[in-house]
Image (tube, rainbow, N blue to C red):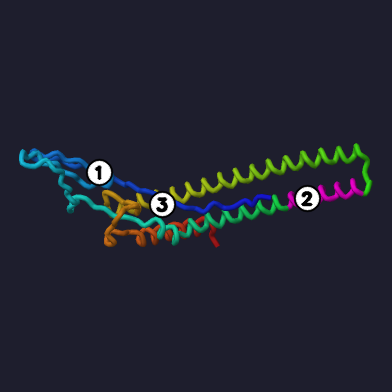
Amino acid sequence: MKQVAVVVLGLLLAFSVASCKNEGQGGNTSTTDSLGVSTTEASSSQSTTSQVVFPSDGIRIAWVNMDSLLKGYDYYFAMQREMEALTAQAEKELTTKGQQLQKRDEKLRNDVEKGLVTRSEAQQQAQELAQDQTRYLQLQESKRQQLAEEEQVRLRRVQDAIDTYIRKYNQEHGYHYILSVGLLYADPALSVTQDVLRGLNADYAAQQTTNNPK
């Protein structure tokens, strides 16, 4: 009998809170790549090579390490615990039904061997058992789909909570970009991971207090 397993929650969430416009100056043409880094192409007749212009004080960028964020996010672990409970419940139900079917099958075989049932009775019981086994397999698939849907709902809840907090966080800090780590290099000084994590856990604790007053 197949075991119903929890799919490990893994999240890679990207946040883009605001966008900025690059203005061309003089005879230069300015473009912006996906990370908001301006690239200026000189129109001088002596050079046609592109030159990367690094952000100055005009652009404010921060980043969040999503792995570290999720490892410390209390709401994420609450969602994991819910999934574990749902999975354990489904496994228990399937195990009980599977054992019942196995006992019925063993009893029918034993009764047939001992001649305790007529041929027609044995055929009828075998047909009923086969139908119940088919329904059991359908139940297994239904539980699998149900758990997958429950997991997706919890993934979206976690993502929505982070998105909502990031927007609120940026109202106070005014970054042009808050990125999730997926870069070849990110300056540690620009990380706001721990700051965001503290805020997320504080919000979650406040919600728990409101929803479960003593």
Q: Earlier in the sequence, mark 1 or mark 2?
A: 1
Q: Which residues are magenta?
A: 96-113
Let me know if residue 57 is in the magenta part: no
Residue on which disc 3 sits:
162
Let me know if residue 102 is in the magenta part: yes
Q: Secondary structure at mark 3?
A: helix
Question: CA gap, disc 3 to disc 2?
Answer: 47 Å
Q: Nearer the viewer, mark 1 or mark 2?
A: 2
Residue on which disc 2 sits:
102
Name the residue at 72% across, 40% down: 135
Q: Residue furthest front?
A: 113
Residue on which disc 1 sits:
33
Residue 175: give x, y in percent of width and height.
Answer: 27, 51
Decide: is 133 above or below 89. Answer: above
Residue 134: give x, y in percent of width and height.
Answer: 73, 40
Of the pair 137 and 15, the residue shown nearer to us: 137
User: Disc 2 residue type?
Assistant: Gln
